[in-house]
Image: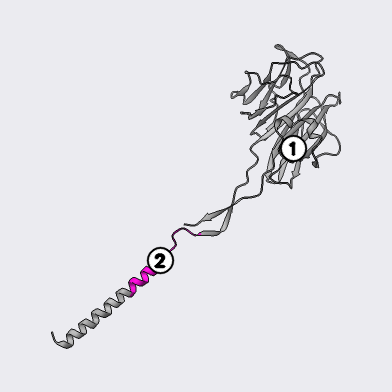
Amino acid sequence: MSRLNLLGASAALASTSLILMLALLVTQGVTARAPTSPPISAVNAPQAFRPPSEYCYSWDFNNSTGQDATGVHLRLSNIQTLTQVYTDTLNPFGNLDPSSGYDAGTATYRFHFDNGFAYAADRVLLGLCTDQPRLRLDQAYGAAWLSGTTSLAPAPLFAGIEFNWLARDQVTVKIVNEQATTMTLEIADALQPEAALPLTDLVPDIALQLPFVTELITDPVTLPPFASQSFDVQLSALNQPIVFEARLSPEADPSDTVHLLAETTVPGWQIFLPVVLR
């Protein structure tokens, strides 16, 4: 090979090496700047609205049978489990009877008390907490006072209630006359405790001390047998406890009342979670 050809070949090889080195440096720089984790989008995903998951109910009523009762039995519809039962001083029967529990065949809960005395004209308070947004009496079985195994008339008065959450700050509350007689809805309102009341404090004397959120009625409302009245309630204090109160009495005897208290927690503000883009 001539000297001129040798010099040309060397120059070409040097140029090729330089190009390869520059390409390698560029590739390494891009690799070094590549993200090591997926980027986080500036768009956030709101958590889906969830209604409350716990409700506590208490209701008090007279023993109007004119006789001493040794027990009281109720069948509650569409309740499967209880998280608490009121057994304090206003319940003269104490703990639930072992015959209590969910009956899958009828989709009812046997709410039975058989170990105490409710004397004639005594006032009795029962209460429970559950995950269900409704407290309703099953009409096929109803409620009964008992003396031993004998039913006493008239049956205990009962008031039903249902919650239908339309938004985290809006709920429809339905109050139900569960009797076969006309009842007067005397009181219906929403109350705001500073903190959630334990079931032992969900009682009329403490309810009297709670501040009003709103009055659902300003005048008494007549409820025919098994009729109901619904109220759309706007709530501003989110993530706070709320107590709804209702009192009903028979048209034939306004002194014989059933007083219902229902407590839950208003859902809180939306929680925003980052969306990770891969």
Q: Residue at x 17, y 86 (%)?
A: 5
Q: Residue furthest left?
A: 1
- For the question of whether residue 275 can be seen, the reply is yes
The image shows a total of numbered marks equal to 2
Secondary structure of residue under mark 1:
strand
State the mark number for residue 32.
Answer: 2
Residue 275 higher or lower than 212, as above or below: below
Query: Mark 1 — residue?
Result: 243
- Cα separation, mark 2 vs mark 1, equals 60 Å
Quarter of the image where one finds residue 266: top right
Secondary structure of residue under mark 2:
helix
Q: Amino acid at mark 1?
A: Val
Quarter of the image where one finds residue 16: bottom left
Q: Amino acid at mark 2?
A: Ala
Observer-side mark, 2 or 1, equals: 2
Q: Which residues are magenta?
A: 22-39
The picture places residue 156, in percent across and down from the top left corner, at 76, 21
- For the question of whether residue 179 can be seen, the reply is no
Is residue 37 inside the magenta stretch?
yes
Q: Residue at x 17, y 84 (%)?
A: 6
Q: Main secondary structure of the magenta part?
A: helix
